[in-house]
Amino acid sequence: MTRAPLRDRYADLSADLIAVLAAALLLLVAVLVGRHLQDTYRVLFVHWPPLFADWDPHVGPGTPAAVLVAAAVVAYGPGLALRLPWRGLLGAAWGTSLAWTWSLALVDGWRRGVATRLTRPNEYLTVIGRFQDVPATLRDFTHHIVSGSPAAWPAHIAGHPPAATLTFVLLDRIGLRGGGWAGAWCVTVGSTAGVAVLVAVRALADERLARRAAPFLVLAPAAVWVGVSADGYFAAVAAWAVALLALAVTGRSVAWAAGAGLLYGLTCYLSYGLTLFALIGVAVLVLGRRRGRARPVVLALLLAGAAVVPLVFTLAGFDWWQGYRLLVTRYYQGIGGTRPYGYWVWANLACTMVVTGPATAAGLRRAGAALVHRRTAAEAERGTAAAAHRGTPAAGRTRLALLAGAALLALLIADLSGMSKAETERIWLPFAMWLLPACALLPRPRAWLTAQALLALLLNHLLFTGW
Protein backbone atom coordinates (compact mmCIF):
# COMPACT_ATOMS: atom_id res chain seq x y z
CA MET A 1 0.00 0.00 0.00
CA THR A 2 1.58 3.25 -1.14
CA ARG A 3 1.84 6.17 1.24
CA ALA A 4 -0.19 9.28 0.51
CA PRO A 5 1.79 12.33 -0.68
CA LEU A 6 3.14 14.49 2.11
CA ARG A 7 0.82 17.37 1.18
CA ASP A 8 -2.22 15.09 1.40
CA ARG A 9 -1.12 13.75 4.77
CA TYR A 10 -0.82 17.26 6.17
CA ALA A 11 -4.21 18.17 4.69
CA ASP A 12 -5.75 15.15 6.42
CA LEU A 13 -4.12 16.06 9.72
CA SER A 14 -5.38 19.62 9.43
CA ALA A 15 -8.91 18.35 8.78
CA ASP A 16 -8.61 16.03 11.80
CA LEU A 17 -7.56 18.90 14.04
CA ILE A 18 -10.42 21.05 12.74
CA ALA A 19 -12.86 18.26 13.66
CA VAL A 20 -11.35 18.09 17.16
CA LEU A 21 -11.53 21.87 17.49
CA ALA A 22 -15.18 21.83 16.44
CA ALA A 23 -15.96 19.18 19.07
CA ALA A 24 -14.10 21.19 21.72
CA LEU A 25 -15.97 24.34 20.73
CA LEU A 26 -19.28 22.50 20.97
CA LEU A 27 -18.38 21.41 24.50
CA LEU A 28 -17.26 24.90 25.49
CA VAL A 29 -20.51 26.44 24.27
CA ALA A 30 -22.49 23.71 26.05
CA VAL A 31 -20.65 24.50 29.29
CA LEU A 32 -21.11 28.29 29.01
CA VAL A 33 -24.73 28.23 27.86
CA GLY A 34 -25.56 25.47 30.31
CA ARG A 35 -24.03 27.36 33.21
CA HIS A 36 -26.08 30.43 32.32
CA LEU A 37 -29.34 28.46 32.04
CA GLN A 38 -28.74 26.59 35.27
CA ASP A 39 -27.68 29.64 37.29
CA THR A 40 -30.46 31.83 35.93
CA TYR A 41 -33.46 29.51 35.49
CA ARG A 42 -32.55 26.29 37.33
CA VAL A 43 -34.00 24.16 34.53
CA LEU A 44 -31.12 21.81 33.64
CA PHE A 45 -30.92 19.87 36.92
CA VAL A 46 -27.22 19.17 36.50
CA HIS A 47 -24.48 20.77 38.58
CA TRP A 48 -21.76 20.86 35.90
CA PRO A 49 -23.59 21.18 32.57
CA PRO A 50 -23.70 19.46 30.23
CA LEU A 51 -22.42 16.57 32.38
CA PHE A 52 -24.32 15.16 35.34
CA ALA A 53 -21.42 15.75 37.71
CA ASP A 54 -20.00 17.95 40.47
CA TRP A 55 -16.76 19.89 40.45
CA ASP A 56 -14.61 17.92 42.90
CA PRO A 57 -10.83 17.86 42.29
CA HIS A 58 -9.45 14.78 44.04
CA VAL A 59 -7.12 11.81 43.87
CA GLY A 60 -7.68 8.35 45.26
CA PRO A 61 -6.31 4.81 45.55
CA GLY A 62 -6.94 4.18 41.86
CA THR A 63 -4.89 7.15 40.68
CA PRO A 64 -1.43 5.47 40.40
CA ALA A 65 -2.89 2.43 38.65
CA ALA A 66 -4.88 4.58 36.20
CA VAL A 67 -1.77 6.56 35.26
CA LEU A 68 0.30 3.38 34.83
CA VAL A 69 -2.35 1.66 32.69
CA ALA A 70 -2.70 4.74 30.50
CA ALA A 71 1.07 5.06 30.04
CA ALA A 72 1.44 1.35 29.23
CA VAL A 73 -1.33 1.39 26.61
CA VAL A 74 0.03 4.53 24.96
CA ALA A 75 3.58 3.15 24.86
CA TYR A 76 2.96 -0.49 23.97
CA GLY A 77 -0.70 -0.81 22.94
CA PRO A 78 -0.46 -0.04 19.19
CA GLY A 79 2.52 -2.34 18.65
CA LEU A 80 1.15 -5.25 20.68
CA ALA A 81 -2.25 -4.94 19.04
CA LEU A 82 -0.62 -5.63 15.67
CA ARG A 83 1.62 -8.48 16.86
CA LEU A 84 -0.40 -10.55 19.31
CA PRO A 85 -2.32 -13.62 18.11
CA TRP A 86 -5.97 -12.72 17.63
CA ARG A 87 -7.26 -14.61 20.66
CA GLY A 88 -4.40 -13.27 22.73
CA LEU A 89 -5.34 -9.75 21.65
CA LEU A 90 -8.95 -10.27 22.74
CA GLY A 91 -7.83 -11.52 26.15
CA ALA A 92 -5.33 -8.68 26.54
CA ALA A 93 -7.94 -6.11 25.51
CA TRP A 94 -10.42 -7.37 28.10
CA GLY A 95 -7.82 -7.59 30.84
CA THR A 96 -6.48 -4.11 30.15
CA SER A 97 -9.98 -2.68 29.88
CA LEU A 98 -10.79 -4.21 33.26
CA ALA A 99 -7.67 -2.66 34.78
CA TRP A 100 -8.43 0.75 33.25
CA THR A 101 -12.08 0.76 34.33
CA TRP A 102 -11.36 -0.48 37.86
CA SER A 103 -8.57 2.01 38.39
CA LEU A 104 -10.74 4.91 37.24
CA ALA A 105 -13.60 3.79 39.48
CA LEU A 106 -11.25 3.51 42.45
CA VAL A 107 -10.02 7.07 41.99
CA ASP A 108 -13.20 7.84 43.98
CA GLY A 109 -12.40 5.11 46.52
CA TRP A 110 -14.11 1.76 47.04
CA ARG A 111 -17.19 3.02 48.83
CA ARG A 112 -17.89 6.19 46.88
CA GLY A 113 -16.63 4.87 43.56
CA VAL A 114 -18.08 1.34 43.54
CA ALA A 115 -19.95 0.00 46.56
CA THR A 116 -22.63 2.69 46.92
CA ARG A 117 -23.22 3.60 43.27
CA LEU A 118 -26.16 1.22 42.78
CA THR A 119 -27.58 1.58 46.28
CA ARG A 120 -28.64 5.22 46.00
CA PRO A 121 -32.33 6.17 46.24
CA ASN A 122 -33.04 6.01 42.49
CA GLU A 123 -31.03 2.84 41.87
CA TYR A 124 -31.86 -0.81 41.34
CA LEU A 125 -30.72 -2.31 44.63
CA THR A 126 -33.22 -0.24 46.63
CA VAL A 127 -36.13 -2.40 45.41
CA ILE A 128 -34.64 -5.89 45.76
CA GLY A 129 -37.03 -6.64 48.62
CA ARG A 130 -40.06 -6.00 46.40
CA PHE A 131 -39.13 -8.94 44.13
CA GLN A 132 -39.70 -11.74 46.64
CA ASP A 133 -42.37 -13.11 44.30
CA VAL A 134 -40.91 -12.37 40.87
CA PRO A 135 -43.91 -13.47 38.73
CA ALA A 136 -46.31 -11.41 40.85
CA THR A 137 -44.02 -8.38 40.69
CA LEU A 138 -43.74 -8.63 36.91
CA ARG A 139 -47.53 -8.80 36.56
CA ASP A 140 -47.80 -5.70 38.74
CA PHE A 141 -44.76 -3.86 37.39
CA THR A 142 -46.53 -1.34 35.15
CA HIS A 143 -48.89 -0.28 37.95
CA HIS A 144 -46.02 1.52 39.69
CA ILE A 145 -44.34 3.37 36.83
CA VAL A 146 -46.25 6.66 36.81
CA SER A 147 -45.51 9.15 39.58
CA GLY A 148 -48.34 9.32 42.09
CA SER A 149 -49.26 5.66 41.69
CA PRO A 150 -49.12 3.53 44.86
CA ALA A 151 -45.52 2.69 45.78
CA ALA A 152 -44.18 4.22 42.57
CA TRP A 153 -40.86 2.79 41.43
CA PRO A 154 -37.72 4.91 41.86
CA ALA A 155 -36.58 6.68 38.68
CA HIS A 156 -34.20 4.10 37.24
CA ILE A 157 -36.51 1.15 37.90
CA ALA A 158 -39.47 2.97 36.36
CA GLY A 159 -37.31 4.09 33.45
CA HIS A 160 -36.28 0.60 32.34
CA PRO A 161 -38.00 -2.69 31.55
CA PRO A 162 -37.75 -5.17 34.43
CA ALA A 163 -34.83 -7.22 33.09
CA ALA A 164 -32.52 -4.45 34.32
CA THR A 165 -33.70 -4.78 37.92
CA LEU A 166 -34.03 -8.55 37.69
CA THR A 167 -30.31 -8.79 36.94
CA PHE A 168 -29.50 -7.46 40.39
CA VAL A 169 -32.29 -9.48 41.98
CA LEU A 170 -30.70 -12.64 40.57
CA LEU A 171 -27.26 -11.59 41.80
CA ASP A 172 -28.76 -11.15 45.24
CA ARG A 173 -30.45 -14.57 45.08
CA ILE A 174 -27.17 -16.38 44.32
CA GLY A 175 -25.45 -14.69 47.25
CA LEU A 176 -23.74 -11.77 45.49
CA ARG A 177 -25.51 -9.20 47.61
CA GLY A 178 -24.92 -5.49 48.01
CA GLY A 179 -23.47 -2.62 46.04
CA GLY A 180 -19.95 -4.02 45.88
CA TRP A 181 -20.99 -7.13 43.99
CA ALA A 182 -23.39 -5.16 41.79
CA GLY A 183 -20.62 -2.70 40.92
CA ALA A 184 -18.18 -5.52 40.22
CA TRP A 185 -20.75 -7.13 37.91
CA CYS A 186 -21.16 -3.92 35.90
CA VAL A 187 -17.41 -3.36 35.61
CA THR A 188 -16.63 -6.98 34.69
CA VAL A 189 -19.37 -7.40 32.12
CA GLY A 190 -19.17 -3.82 30.85
CA SER A 191 -15.46 -4.21 30.12
CA THR A 192 -16.23 -6.92 27.57
CA ALA A 193 -18.08 -4.48 25.30
CA GLY A 194 -14.86 -3.44 23.59
CA VAL A 195 -13.98 -7.08 22.92
CA ALA A 196 -17.36 -7.58 21.25
CA VAL A 197 -16.78 -4.54 19.06
CA LEU A 198 -13.38 -5.92 18.00
CA VAL A 199 -14.97 -9.23 17.03
CA ALA A 200 -17.57 -7.45 14.91
CA VAL A 201 -15.10 -5.10 13.21
CA ARG A 202 -12.81 -7.98 12.30
CA ALA A 203 -15.71 -9.98 10.86
CA LEU A 204 -17.34 -7.15 8.94
CA ALA A 205 -14.46 -4.90 7.93
CA ASP A 206 -10.86 -5.99 8.30
CA GLU A 207 -8.67 -7.61 10.94
CA ARG A 208 -5.99 -4.96 10.68
CA LEU A 209 -8.57 -2.24 11.30
CA ALA A 210 -9.83 -4.14 14.32
CA ARG A 211 -6.28 -4.40 15.66
CA ARG A 212 -5.72 -0.68 15.15
CA ALA A 213 -8.98 0.06 16.97
CA ALA A 214 -8.13 -2.14 19.98
CA PRO A 215 -6.07 0.37 22.03
CA PHE A 216 -8.74 3.04 21.52
CA LEU A 217 -11.49 0.73 22.73
CA VAL A 218 -9.39 -0.15 25.78
CA LEU A 219 -8.41 3.41 26.71
CA ALA A 220 -11.73 5.09 25.96
CA PRO A 221 -12.91 7.92 28.25
CA ALA A 222 -16.20 5.98 28.29
CA ALA A 223 -14.63 3.78 30.97
CA VAL A 224 -15.26 6.61 33.44
CA TRP A 225 -18.98 5.79 33.18
CA VAL A 226 -18.76 2.05 32.50
CA GLY A 227 -17.45 1.66 36.04
CA VAL A 228 -20.17 3.62 37.78
CA SER A 229 -23.49 2.70 36.17
CA ALA A 230 -25.52 -0.24 34.92
CA ASP A 231 -25.40 1.24 31.42
CA GLY A 232 -21.95 -0.28 30.93
CA TYR A 233 -23.54 -3.70 31.47
CA PHE A 234 -26.30 -2.81 28.99
CA ALA A 235 -23.64 -1.73 26.49
CA ALA A 236 -21.91 -5.11 26.71
CA VAL A 237 -25.10 -7.11 26.13
CA ALA A 238 -25.98 -4.98 23.10
CA ALA A 239 -22.41 -5.19 21.77
CA TRP A 240 -22.33 -8.97 21.97
CA ALA A 241 -25.67 -9.14 20.15
CA VAL A 242 -24.07 -7.26 17.25
CA ALA A 243 -20.85 -9.29 17.43
CA LEU A 244 -22.66 -12.63 17.28
CA LEU A 245 -24.75 -11.42 14.35
CA ALA A 246 -21.55 -10.32 12.57
CA LEU A 247 -20.10 -13.81 13.05
CA ALA A 248 -23.29 -15.35 11.69
CA VAL A 249 -23.56 -13.21 8.55
CA THR A 250 -19.89 -13.66 7.66
CA GLY A 251 -20.16 -17.42 7.70
CA ARG A 252 -18.45 -18.41 10.96
CA SER A 253 -21.60 -20.21 12.07
CA VAL A 254 -25.21 -19.33 11.29
CA ALA A 255 -26.13 -20.65 14.75
CA TRP A 256 -24.64 -17.46 16.20
CA ALA A 257 -27.68 -15.66 14.76
CA ALA A 258 -29.92 -17.29 17.36
CA GLY A 259 -27.62 -16.10 20.12
CA ALA A 260 -27.60 -12.61 18.59
CA GLY A 261 -31.40 -12.57 18.57
CA LEU A 262 -31.56 -13.78 22.16
CA LEU A 263 -29.20 -11.02 23.33
CA TYR A 264 -31.04 -8.40 21.29
CA GLY A 265 -34.31 -9.43 22.94
CA LEU A 266 -32.62 -9.11 26.33
CA THR A 267 -31.23 -5.70 25.32
CA CYS A 268 -34.75 -4.44 24.62
CA TYR A 269 -35.83 -5.55 28.11
CA LEU A 270 -32.84 -3.87 29.74
CA SER A 271 -33.53 -0.44 28.23
CA TYR A 272 -36.39 0.81 26.08
CA GLY A 273 -34.13 3.11 24.08
CA LEU A 274 -31.81 0.29 23.03
CA THR A 275 -34.42 -1.03 20.60
CA LEU A 276 -32.60 1.40 18.27
CA PHE A 277 -29.81 -1.17 18.10
CA ALA A 278 -31.97 -2.72 15.40
CA LEU A 279 -30.46 -0.07 13.08
CA ILE A 280 -26.97 -1.37 13.79
CA GLY A 281 -28.26 -4.90 13.28
CA VAL A 282 -29.64 -3.92 9.87
CA ALA A 283 -26.25 -2.44 8.97
CA VAL A 284 -24.62 -5.74 9.92
CA LEU A 285 -27.05 -7.68 7.72
CA VAL A 286 -26.39 -5.32 4.81
CA LEU A 287 -22.62 -5.55 5.23
CA GLY A 288 -22.88 -9.34 5.42
CA ARG A 289 -24.93 -9.39 2.25
CA ARG A 290 -22.39 -7.19 0.50
CA ARG A 291 -19.75 -9.75 1.35
CA GLY A 292 -21.97 -12.41 -0.25
CA ARG A 293 -22.43 -14.58 2.83
CA ALA A 294 -25.71 -13.59 4.47
CA ARG A 295 -28.36 -16.29 4.13
CA PRO A 296 -32.11 -16.39 4.81
CA VAL A 297 -31.51 -18.89 7.61
CA VAL A 298 -29.53 -16.22 9.48
CA LEU A 299 -32.54 -13.90 9.49
CA ALA A 300 -34.86 -16.75 10.53
CA LEU A 301 -32.64 -17.73 13.46
CA LEU A 302 -32.18 -14.08 14.44
CA LEU A 303 -35.93 -13.49 14.60
CA ALA A 304 -36.52 -16.75 16.45
CA GLY A 305 -33.90 -15.88 19.04
CA ALA A 306 -35.20 -12.33 19.39
CA ALA A 307 -38.66 -13.63 20.22
CA VAL A 308 -37.57 -15.64 23.28
CA VAL A 309 -37.11 -12.90 25.90
CA PRO A 310 -40.22 -10.91 24.87
CA LEU A 311 -42.26 -14.12 24.95
CA VAL A 312 -41.04 -15.02 28.44
CA PHE A 313 -41.78 -11.58 29.86
CA THR A 314 -45.14 -11.35 28.11
CA LEU A 315 -46.22 -14.74 29.48
CA ALA A 316 -45.03 -13.60 32.90
CA GLY A 317 -47.42 -10.65 32.68
CA PHE A 318 -45.23 -7.68 31.70
CA ASP A 319 -46.46 -5.62 28.74
CA TRP A 320 -43.46 -3.87 27.13
CA TRP A 321 -45.55 -1.45 25.09
CA GLN A 322 -47.67 -0.43 28.04
CA GLY A 323 -44.52 0.01 30.11
CA TYR A 324 -43.03 2.32 27.49
CA ARG A 325 -46.17 4.43 27.19
CA LEU A 326 -46.32 4.84 30.96
CA LEU A 327 -42.62 5.68 31.04
CA VAL A 328 -43.22 8.58 28.62
CA THR A 329 -45.86 9.88 31.03
CA ARG A 330 -43.49 9.47 33.99
CA TYR A 331 -40.67 11.18 32.08
CA TYR A 332 -42.67 14.33 31.44
CA GLN A 333 -44.06 14.33 34.99
CA GLY A 334 -40.56 14.79 36.33
CA ILE A 335 -37.52 16.86 35.39
CA GLY A 336 -37.61 15.44 31.87
CA GLY A 337 -40.60 17.68 31.24
CA THR A 338 -38.72 20.72 32.56
CA ARG A 339 -35.31 20.29 30.98
CA PRO A 340 -35.26 22.42 27.78
CA TYR A 341 -35.20 20.39 24.56
CA GLY A 342 -33.64 23.35 22.72
CA TYR A 343 -30.48 23.05 24.84
CA TRP A 344 -30.16 19.33 25.30
CA VAL A 345 -30.76 18.39 21.65
CA TRP A 346 -27.25 19.68 20.86
CA ALA A 347 -25.64 19.60 24.32
CA ASN A 348 -26.22 15.83 24.40
CA LEU A 349 -23.82 15.60 21.45
CA ALA A 350 -21.21 17.48 23.48
CA CYS A 351 -21.61 14.81 26.17
CA THR A 352 -20.98 12.15 23.53
CA MET A 353 -17.79 13.90 22.44
CA VAL A 354 -16.61 13.80 26.06
CA VAL A 355 -17.35 10.07 26.36
CA THR A 356 -15.66 9.13 23.09
CA GLY A 357 -12.81 11.64 23.20
CA PRO A 358 -11.03 13.86 20.65
CA ALA A 359 -9.66 10.90 18.70
CA THR A 360 -13.19 9.79 17.86
CA ALA A 361 -14.08 13.24 16.51
CA ALA A 362 -11.13 12.94 14.13
CA GLY A 363 -11.89 9.30 13.38
CA LEU A 364 -15.50 10.05 12.48
CA ARG A 365 -14.24 12.81 10.18
CA ARG A 366 -12.12 10.22 8.40
CA ALA A 367 -15.01 7.75 8.33
CA GLY A 368 -17.16 10.37 6.64
CA ALA A 369 -14.41 11.04 4.14
CA ALA A 370 -14.12 7.31 3.44
CA LEU A 371 -17.83 7.18 2.58
CA VAL A 372 -17.75 10.31 0.45
CA HIS A 373 -14.67 9.23 -1.52
CA ARG A 374 -15.30 5.50 -1.68
CA ARG A 375 -15.95 5.58 -5.44
CA THR A 376 -12.80 7.56 -6.08
CA ALA A 377 -10.79 5.13 -3.99
CA ALA A 378 -12.29 2.18 -5.85
CA GLU A 379 -11.42 3.73 -9.19
CA ALA A 380 -7.86 4.45 -8.05
CA GLU A 381 -7.36 0.83 -7.03
CA ARG A 382 -9.14 -0.67 -10.04
CA GLY A 383 -7.09 -2.55 -12.54
CA THR A 384 -5.45 -5.11 -10.28
CA ALA A 385 -6.86 -8.47 -9.36
CA ALA A 386 -6.52 -7.70 -5.67
CA ALA A 387 -8.44 -4.44 -6.01
CA ALA A 388 -11.30 -6.21 -7.70
CA HIS A 389 -11.83 -8.26 -4.58
CA ARG A 390 -14.04 -6.87 -1.80
CA GLY A 391 -11.28 -7.35 0.72
CA THR A 392 -9.25 -4.28 -0.31
CA PRO A 393 -8.15 -1.82 2.40
CA ALA A 394 -10.47 0.83 0.91
CA ALA A 395 -13.41 -1.57 1.12
CA GLY A 396 -12.60 -2.38 4.75
CA ARG A 397 -12.50 1.30 5.64
CA THR A 398 -15.84 1.83 3.94
CA ARG A 399 -17.46 -1.04 5.83
CA LEU A 400 -16.06 0.28 9.10
CA ALA A 401 -17.43 3.73 8.27
CA LEU A 402 -20.87 2.27 7.52
CA LEU A 403 -20.90 0.46 10.87
CA ALA A 404 -19.96 3.61 12.78
CA GLY A 405 -22.47 5.57 10.70
CA ALA A 406 -25.29 3.24 11.72
CA ALA A 407 -24.42 3.76 15.39
CA LEU A 408 -24.32 7.52 14.87
CA LEU A 409 -27.72 7.43 13.17
CA ALA A 410 -29.23 5.48 16.07
CA LEU A 411 -27.74 7.98 18.51
CA LEU A 412 -29.15 10.94 16.57
CA ILE A 413 -32.62 9.41 16.52
CA ALA A 414 -32.42 8.92 20.28
CA ASP A 415 -31.38 12.54 20.56
CA LEU A 416 -34.22 13.91 18.43
CA SER A 417 -36.79 11.83 20.34
CA GLY A 418 -36.45 14.14 23.34
CA MET A 419 -36.42 11.14 25.69
CA SER A 420 -32.72 11.54 26.43
CA LYS A 421 -32.29 15.04 27.81
CA ALA A 422 -29.13 15.03 29.94
CA GLU A 423 -27.19 12.14 31.49
CA THR A 424 -26.46 10.82 28.01
CA GLU A 425 -22.80 10.34 28.92
CA ARG A 426 -23.97 7.08 30.51
CA ILE A 427 -27.32 6.46 28.75
CA TRP A 428 -25.68 6.46 25.31
CA LEU A 429 -22.68 4.31 26.28
CA PRO A 430 -24.02 1.41 24.16
CA PHE A 431 -24.01 3.61 21.03
CA ALA A 432 -20.75 5.36 21.89
CA MET A 433 -18.84 2.05 21.89
CA TRP A 434 -19.54 1.71 18.16
CA LEU A 435 -18.17 5.16 17.34
CA LEU A 436 -14.77 4.38 18.86
CA PRO A 437 -13.59 1.97 16.09
CA ALA A 438 -13.44 4.96 13.73
CA CYS A 439 -10.18 5.79 15.54
CA ALA A 440 -8.60 2.89 13.62
CA LEU A 441 -8.49 5.21 10.60
CA LEU A 442 -6.11 7.63 12.33
CA PRO A 443 -2.32 7.75 11.86
CA ARG A 444 0.02 8.42 14.79
CA PRO A 445 -2.05 6.38 17.27
CA ARG A 446 0.15 7.16 20.27
CA ALA A 447 -0.54 10.90 20.04
CA TRP A 448 -4.28 10.31 19.83
CA LEU A 449 -4.21 7.73 22.63
CA THR A 450 -2.41 10.24 24.83
CA ALA A 451 -5.20 12.75 24.24
CA GLN A 452 -7.82 10.10 25.07
CA ALA A 453 -6.06 9.10 28.30
CA LEU A 454 -5.52 12.67 29.45
CA LEU A 455 -9.19 13.48 28.94
CA ALA A 456 -10.31 10.43 30.94
CA LEU A 457 -7.88 11.14 33.77
CA LEU A 458 -8.88 14.81 33.96
CA LEU A 459 -12.57 13.95 33.98
CA ASN A 460 -12.21 11.40 36.73
CA HIS A 461 -9.94 13.54 38.92
CA LEU A 462 -11.66 16.91 38.49
CA LEU A 463 -15.31 15.81 38.51
CA PHE A 464 -17.40 13.43 40.56
CA THR A 465 -19.99 11.74 38.35
CA GLY A 466 -23.07 10.63 40.24
CA TRP A 467 -26.47 9.20 39.46
Image (cartoon, rainbow, N blue to C red):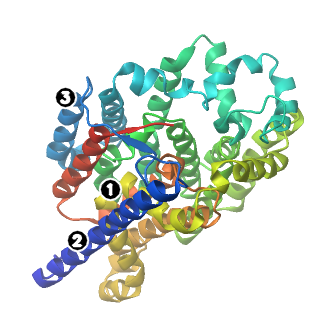
Q: CA distance from mark 2 to mark 1?
A: 13 Å
The percent position of residue 341, horizontal first and vertical second, equals: 59, 65
Identify the residue at horizontal 55%, vertical 66% (top origin).
Answer: 412
Identify the residue at horizontal 85%, vertical 48% (top origin).
Answer: 322
Q: Residues within 10 Å of mark 3 (few under 14, many from 20)?
A: few
Provide the secondary structure element on which disc 1 rests.
loop
Q: CA distance from mark 3 to mark 1?
A: 22 Å
- On screen, 315 above or below 43? above
Which numbered dot is residue 357? 1
The percent position of residue 98, horizontal first and vertical second, equals: 36, 32
The percent position of residue 31, horizontal first and vertical second, equals: 37, 59
**Can residue 388 be seen at all in this image of the molecule?**
yes
Q: Is residue 389 left or right of residue 337?
A: left
Which residue type carries mark 1? Gly
**Can residue 392 be seen at all in this image of the molecule?**
no
Quadrant of the snapshot with the N terminus: bottom left
Q: Residues within 10 Å of mark 1 (few under 14, many from 20)?
A: many
Return the residue nearer the eye: 352 or 59: 59
Identify the residue at horizontal 31%, vertical 35% (top origin).
Answer: 100
First-in-chain label (3 vs 1):
3
Which residue type carries mark 3? Pro
Which numbered dot is residue 64? 3
First-in-chain label (2 vs 1):
2
Report which residue position mark 2 lands on.
17
Return the residue nearer the eye: 255 or 170: 170
